[in-house]
Image (spheres, rainbow, N blue to C red):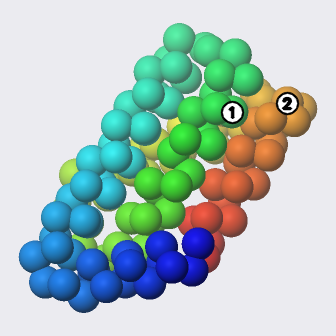
């Protein structure tokens, strides 16, 4: 895990690789958020939402502390997080959802 972090830091310091890595992280996060928002709109089960929350945690952590997000990306990711939070009320008694939310929150805070 530490080696992966060292490699990522190396890529970030690598100039154009930084921009490409950032763009890929934003794209991955948007894709996972679209899946979550689509499922939330159809009132998917809490187990399904738990899996989607877990899937969005990693890419979201990669971009959540970025200062150079475009306004549309920032707005979209805020909408995604708001939807995840709104569904927490509906799914807070679901153990898988609670665990996924904890993982998401800890990854965003780091």
Residue 48 appears left or right of 18: right
Residue in the foreground of this view, choosing between 61 and 4: 4
Q: Could you tell me if residue 84 is visible in this image?
A: no
Do the CB atoms of the residues marked 1 and 2 lie less than 8 Å apart? yes
Residue at x-position 38% and y-position 31%: 34
Q: Could you tell me if residue 43 is visible in this image?
A: yes
**18 versus 9 height, above or below:** above
**27 versus 95 height, above or below:** below
Instruction: Find the distance from the CA under tag 1 to the CA under tag 2.
Output: 8 Å
Residue in the foreground of this view, choosing between 72 and 46: 46
Instruction: Give residue 81's position: percent from left, percent from top.
Output: 52, 48
Instruction: Give residue 71's position: percent from left, percent from top.
Output: 22, 59
**Residue farthest top in this picture:** 42
Residue matched to label 1: 50
First in sequence, mark 1 or 2: give its number: 1
Residue at x-position 70% and y-position 55%: 103
**Residue farthest front in this picture:** 3
What element does badge 2 sit on? loop
Q: Tell me the quarter of the picture where residue 96 sits.
A: top right
Instruction: Give residue 19's position: percent from left, percent from top.
Output: 16, 70
Q: Tell me the quarter of the picture where residue 24 sits.
A: bottom left
Residue matched to label 2: 94
* Circle 1 crowding by C-alpha within 10 Å: few under 14, some 14–19, many from 20: many
């Amino acid at each position: 895990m530490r080696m992966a972090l060292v490699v990522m830091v190396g890529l970030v310091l690598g100039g154009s690789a930084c921009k490409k890595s950032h763009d890929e992280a934003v794209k991955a996060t948007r894709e996972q958020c679209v899946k979550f928002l689509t499922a939330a709109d159809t009132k998917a089960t809490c187990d399904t939402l738990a899996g989607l929350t877990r899937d969005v945690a990693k890419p979201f952590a990669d971009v959540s502390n970025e200062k150079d997000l475009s306004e549309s990306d920032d707005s979209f990711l805020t909408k995604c997080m708001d939807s995840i939070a709104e569904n927490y009320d509906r799914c807070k008694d679901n153990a898988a959802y609670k665990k996924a939310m904890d993982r998401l929150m800890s990854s965003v805070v780091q």
